[in-house]
Image (tube, coloured by chain):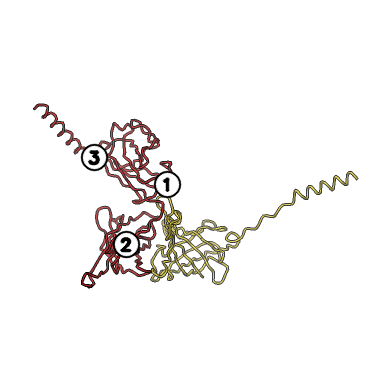
Amino acid sequence: MKQIFSITLAVAILTLVSCKRDDFKEVGNNADFKIETLGGTWSTSSVTQTDEDAIRKGFPFKTQDITSDFNLNQTKISLNLNGTNPGTFTIAYGAAAKLLKHTSGNWALDNLQKPSKVYLINGIDTIKLKINNYTDLGQIPSRLGLKLLKSAYGKTQLGYDYSLTK
Amino acid sequence: MKKIQIILFMLFALCAFNNAVGQATAVITPGSFTAEDQITIRINVTGTSLAGVSPVYLWNWSNLGGLNTNGDWTSSNETRKMTNVGPNLWEFSFTPSDFYSVNPSELKWLGFLAKAKNGNNGQTQDFAPNAVEPLIFTPTVNRVFPARISVNDVTSIFIDQNLAPDLTQQRMTPVSVEIKLFNVSSQVGATITLPLKKIGNKYFTASFIPSAVFVIPATAAPIRFEYKFKGTILDVNNMSVPAEGPVYSKPIDPLQ
């Protein structure tokens, strides 16, 4: 009887100790990313300029929509795939201001599984675009948010938020 | 009489000495800054008693007084050693509120000079006061968005006549903004005029990208632009006559 009690107690303790909440699976950006969904031609819906200095200081006038003044909705970014890897890119500006500077080159990601940046590489000049979100990559239409950040004096000073659709 | 001659000679010698030892020049970047912005002070000591001296040290003070961390006048603290960036050219970077270990809102202006480790062996003149921008937003009649821009960035100029401090800018019907680009010593490209767009009650704006509207030679390095609002105003006979506001200046930053 005593043995049964001991065994029961041990099983109970083991059960309690081994009871542990499962780790949540990663959601959102990390779980959903497939590089195939990035490939293709992205059209610009809007571009918002951000004053990172004003955001940091809590000043008013933090953002401004500059899409129409500079015809930025005519910007089209084509990201071509090389198999399941990033390949070449082209940017057609139309009448839009060339804020992204490059028109062609190779593109890359900082991490193929969990990317946070897209690199547009032209020779030795690389434009780094922060990925704001890609949770809607699988939607129709697909949506992608990219941000070009510029720095000086040891801090980010301004940014351009591109809202893209495909 | 002889004493007067000696005194006159000494005064002459002093003047001659002062003329022989030139003035240093100092540049702070960015041109406008708050206590929480990193700044770089660059001092050119060519032609001064510090010319050829190495190393050179920065000596700081502010509206709050001196700074204990400078060290002694005859033996500067090693943490104040400046970086040599060219012949007689010295730099030092810091964030004022951290550097002075004070509440950012307390700093109103900064002062500094460059010196040899022993200040008796050479120093520049004082560079003070250098205004520290307030950490609160101050609405003004003119505004540029965003705060920091390079020649390749979208730049928007605003005039809010509701905040105009003078009668001309209050009463004027703004039509355009005239913009000039400058490098250190001269104007770059031609003067441009952009139409103003009304976006509210007595509130107008114009946007541009400097590199797209100015012809900037590859060797030019623009550091600022100047702008003024132009329009019309009614004179005493109720006739519309040309009018313009004051000239405003905006630094151009090395954004990357």
Q: How many marks?
A: 3
Say which mark, if any, is on residue B104: 1
Mark 3: secondary structure = loop
- For label 1, the crowd category at 10 Å Cα-Cα, with few meaning under 14, some 14 to 19 and many 20 or more, is some
Which chain hosts label 1?
B
Q: What is the letter of the red chain?
A: B
Chain of the residue under the numbered disc 3 shown in the image: B
Q: Are marks 2 and 1 on the same chain?
A: yes
- Tell me which chain the residue with mark 2 is part of: B
Q: Are marks 2 and 3 on the same chain?
A: yes
Name the one closer to the observer, B167 or B145: B167
Say which amino acid is labelled 3.
Answer: Gly
Answer few, some or many: residues within 10 Å of disc 3's Cα (few below 14, many 20 plus, some between 14 and 19).
some
- In percent of width and height, residue B247 lies at 27, 59
Q: Which chain is yellow?
A: A
Q: A48 or B256, which is in the foreground?
A: A48
| Comparing labels 2 and 3, the label whose residue is closer to the camera | 2
Distance in Å between CA atoms under marks 1 and 3: 36 Å
Give the residue type at disc 1: Pro
- In the displayed structure, does residue B217 sit left or right of residue A54? left
Quick one: label 2 or label 1, which is nearer the N terminus? 1
* Residue under label 2: B164
Label 2 element class: loop
The residues tagged by marks 2 and 3 sit, at their Cα atoms, a distance apart of 44 Å
Residue B47, label in figure? 3
